[in-house]
Amino acid sequence: MDRTFFVLGSVLALLGILAGAFAAHALKGHLSAHQLDVWETGARYHLYQSLALLAVAWAATRWPSTAVNLAGWLFVAGVILFSGSLYLLAVTNVKALGAITPLGGLCFLVGWGSLATAAWRRPPPV
């Protein structure tokens, strides 16, 4: 799983940087300042969680466990739900999409808790 999460983290980081650049260059002038802020919030958390996946990849080598794997998949789900809903909200202005965003935030929170639990419970390999 360490390779899987490292690849996912790297690809999601690449996509997060693209999302930020896209907003700065292609969306500026087409979206309101508020819509750009929404997009940029999505991109910021997208990048944070991409880096978190790199930490999960490392943790999977140090404390392999279900909790580490759960954290990784929750971070992926969080990016899709949180950042994805904000990207869609920014470009469509469909306010109902905002109801999805907290589910992604919850995935982030539970993922970090799961990662902390894995580190706390698992002794380092000998």
Image (cartoon, rainbow, N blue to C red):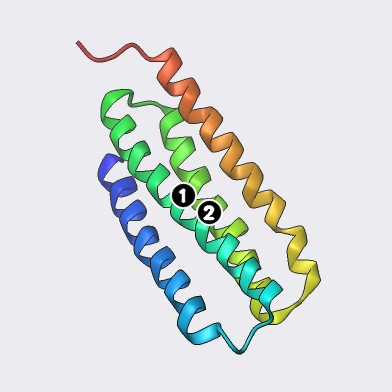
Q: Residue at x 29, y 53 (%)?
A: 7
Residue 110 position in % (x across, y down): 59, 35
Packing grade of label 2 (10 A; few <14, some 14-19, many >=20) is some
Q: Residue furthest bottom?
A: 30
User: Is disc 2 placed on a helix, strand or loop?
Assistant: helix
Query: Total number of numbered labels?
Result: 2
Under mark 2, the amino acid is Tyr
Looking at the rendering, which quadrant does residue 30 occupy?
bottom right
Residue 23 position in % (x across, y down): 51, 77
Q: Residue at x 49, y 57 (%)?
A: 46
Judge left or right: residue 95 versus residue 90.
Answer: right
- Give the quarter of the figure containing the C terminus: top left
| Residue located beneath label 1 in the image | 48
Q: Nearer the viewer, residue 53 or 65?
A: 53
Residue 52 position in % (x across, y down): 42, 43
Q: Nearer the viewer, residue 108 or 5?
A: 108
C-alpha separation, residue under disc 2 versus residue under disc 1: 5 Å
Q: Residue furthest left?
A: 126
Q: Residue at x 54, y 52 (%)?
A: 77
Residue 17 position in % (x across, y down): 39, 66
Q: Residue at x 48, y 51 (%)?
A: 76
* Whether residue 17 is situated above or below residue 90 in the rendered picture: above
Q: Give yes or no for contact between labels 2 and 1 (Cβ–Cβ under 8 Å).
A: yes
User: Is disc 1 placed on a helix, strand or loop?
Assistant: helix
Under mark 1, the amino acid is Tyr
Residue 79 disc label: none
Packing grade of label 1 (10 A; few <14, some 14-19, many >=20) is some
Looking at the rendering, which quadrant does residue 108 occupy?
top right
| Residue located beneath label 2 in the image | 45
* Whether residue 5 is situated above or below residue 13 in the rendered picture: above
- Give the quarter of the figure containing the N terminus: top left
